[in-house]
Image (cartoon, grey):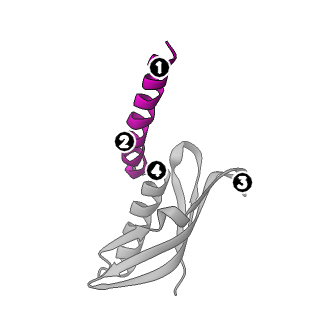
Amino acid sequence: MNVQRLRTALAMIVVFACVEPALAQTPNPELEACRTTGLMALRERNPAIQDVTLDVDGMTVAKANTKVEDTPIRTIVIGDAYLEKGKNDTRRTFLCLIGEKGKVLLTFFTDK
């Protein structure tokens, strides 16, 4: 009986070890909303920007319960982003504020 439990536990560990990398690759919806909104805003000012890549491992996604005047802020995202222009990538600090229902209220990239 103990051998059967051990086999079951080992099988579960193997399954979770295989599944976790796939789950880690699933994009965080808040990060993706910030990335796409930020990319659209950047392209309006500079059409040469092809893409924005967020440093997901270094990103801070913080839940918040605050307001800017009367606008509720529910999530704050801050970290490094890389702007792709042709073959060059430029690292920038990135800030994103998300309000009610996951609506992106602000995306901000430092100049350098």
Disc 3 to disc 1, how far (Cα)? 56 Å
Q: Earlier in the sequence, mark 1 or mark 4?
A: 1
The amino acid sitting under disc 3 is: Lys
Please tell me in which quadrant of the rendered image residue 100 appears: top right
Q: Which residue is mark 2?
A: 18
Helix, strand or loop under label 2: helix
Closest to the camera, between mark 2 and mark 3, is 2
Q: Earlier in the sequence, mark 4 or mark 2?
A: 2
Position of residue 68 measured from the top left corner of the image (x, y, whole percent): 70, 59
Task: For the residues labelled 4 and 3, say whether their Cβ atoms are less than 8 Å apart.
Answer: no
Q: Which residue is mark 1?
A: 3
Region in magenta: 1-25
Q: Is 23 colored magenta in this rendering?
A: yes
The foreground one among 103 and 6 is 6
Helix, strand or loop under label 3: strand
What residue is drawn where x is 42% and y is 42%?
A: 17
Please, is residue 105 above or below residue 72 in the view? below
Q: Earlier in the sequence, mark 1 or mark 2?
A: 1
Q: Residue furthest top?
A: 1
Q: Which residue is mark 3?
A: 67
Q: Earlier in the sequence, mark 4 or mark 3?
A: 4
Helix, strand or loop under label 4: loop
Task: For the residues labelled 2 and 3, say whether their Cβ atoms are less than 8 Å apart.
Answer: no
